[in-house]
Amino acid sequence: MNFEYILADKNADASEISYDVFINKWDENGIDLQLNFSNPLAVSQGRGNDKAMVSIKNPGLFVSKSSGKMIQAENALAVQNVPRQVTLDVDVDKLEGQAIAASLSVKASMILLVILQLRLGMSLDNMFLLFYFMQLMCYLKVYDSPFPANV
């Protein structure tokens, strides 16, 4: 078998990613593999997820006990997305709740900012109001705000 780890972020340091491969289950129905990362916080940095690719070098060695058929060449390659990881001492549910709360508070502050801009813009020159809304439209995404806290 050949294991390859593909980084989604081209600026990420590949030397920070080291892992061990464990076989959880191996029977006539398939193989269940587990990757144990030495530095889980370095996995899937950036907006995209990294990928783990497993390819079988010699598929003829893998024959099903029940059917007697070997693995086809097109099934000898598996690619799986690797989601962001957390360390063992982190409660994932609590982390997701904090991320949702942070996202909602930022959205609420953006809506409050728009309301304040409208209210204050009525007393200012219309040109300043135009600049305020251009800044809001160009630089802020209310519904897709990327944060490090996104899980």
Image (tube, grey):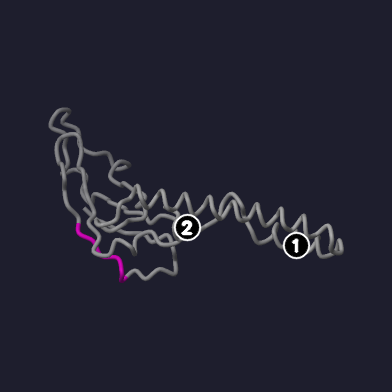
Q: Which mark, by number, is residue 47?
A: 2
Q: Which mark, by number, is residue 148?
A: none
94 or 80: which is nearer to us?
94
92 or 13: which is nearer to us?
92
> Separation of disc 1 and disc 2 at Cα?
28 Å
Residue 29 coordinates in the image, percent (x, y): 19, 34
Tell which circle, 1 or 2, labels the residue nearer the N-terminal end. 2
Q: Is residue 83 left or right of residue 1?
A: right
Q: Residues within 10 Å of mark 2 (few under 14, many from 20)?
A: few
Q: Residue at x 28, y 51 (%)?
A: 54
Residue 62 coordinates in the image, percent (x, y): 17, 41
Q: Which amino acid does the dot numbered 2 rest on?
A: Arg
Q: Residue at x 41, y 62 (%)?
A: 45
Q: Is residue 37 left or right of residue 44?
A: left
Q: Which amino acid does the dot numbered 1 rest on?
A: Tyr
Q: Secondary structure at mark 2?
A: loop
52 or 131: which is nearer to us?
131
* Residue range corresponding to the magenta coloring: 15-20
**How many numbered marks does the figure carry?**
2
Q: Residue at x 23, y 39 (%)?
A: 71
Residue position marked by numbered label 1 in the rendering: 132
